[in-house]
Amino acid sequence: EAGVTQFPSHSVIEKGQTVTLRCDPISGHDNLYWYRRVMGKEIKFLLHFVKESKQDESGMPNNRFLAERTGGTYSTLKVQPAELEDSGVYFCASSPNRGRDTEAFFGQGTRLTVV
Amino acid sequence: AQSVTQLGSHVSVSEGALVLLRCNYSSSVPPYLFWYVQYPNQGLQLLLKYTTGATLVKGINGFEAEFKKSETSFHLTKPSAHMSDAAEYFCAVSPSFYFGNEKLTFGTGTRLTIIP
């Protein structure tokens, strides 16, 4: 079974440009999460989808970030326009359902560098 | 509100020695607690978790952790370090009323180095 897949693995863009990160969750997982780790700091929650609906987007830093989940399958996270402080590693995770015994499976992350 | 503190951003131990990675948490509600590991060029992998019940939790690769409510701690241990344990380890907490793993609050991570 394929795990959580993120594209691209690395992205280097200039300040002011737009970047779109993609996450393909494990097939059949309704829950999809985005997290971000800024250099040397903790991994922070960005938002949570249940199928195609945003369940919680309280961690989104500002309106330059837009997340979508088309048809409840893959998700994209767009940063427009990118700023230097947006650099970091963006993780995506998915889980099948909500319950005590469920587990969130993480992708390998996308390393974003804004120069 | 929840927070996690991991003492020591870098820990080095000799191969065969005890591994002890410290984690203290703060939570206004009963927490679920997790340890994740990230090997180079890989995603985060769940090592173990505490939800309810037995406070000593056993995970993969010989790791275990003990939930101590009075000390608000969830330290990770392994009796004998192996070279393959070299990785970055993250402690995380989520509020139990979510009944799941969403909205994890992570610590800043501890990079474990194994000395041959």
Image (cartoon, coloured by chain):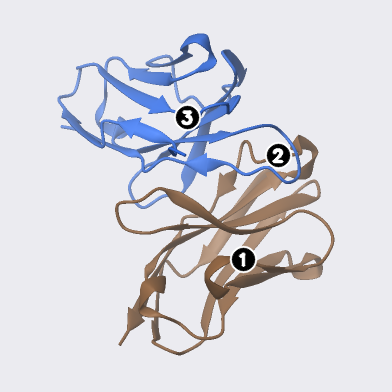
B25, B104: nearer the viewer: B104
Q: Which mark is residue A25?
A: 3
Where is B62 relative to A96, above or below? below
Crowd around label 2: few <14 · some 14–19 · many ≥20 (10 Å): many
Location of residue A114 by image quarter: top left
Q: Which mark is residue B59?
A: 1
Where is A24 relative to B59, above or below? above
Q: Which mark is residue B100?
A: 2
Residue ID at (41%, 50%): A41
- Chain label for disc 2: B
- Have a look at marks 3 and 1 and say if they share a chain: no
- Residue A12 is left or right of residue B110, and the answer is left
For chain A, the rendered hue is: blue
Find the distance from the CA under tag 3 to the CA under tag 1.
24 Å
Residue ID at (27%, 15%): A81
At label 1, the amino acid type is Gly
Residue ID at (58%, 25%): A58
For chain B, the rendered hue is: brown
Q: Which comes sooner in the sequence, label 1 or label 2?
A: 1
Location of residue A76 by image quarter: top left
Would you say the residues marked 3 and 1 are in contact, meaning their CB atoms lie under 8 Å apart?
A: no
At label 2, the amino acid type is Gly
Where's residue B17, x and y in %? 47, 89
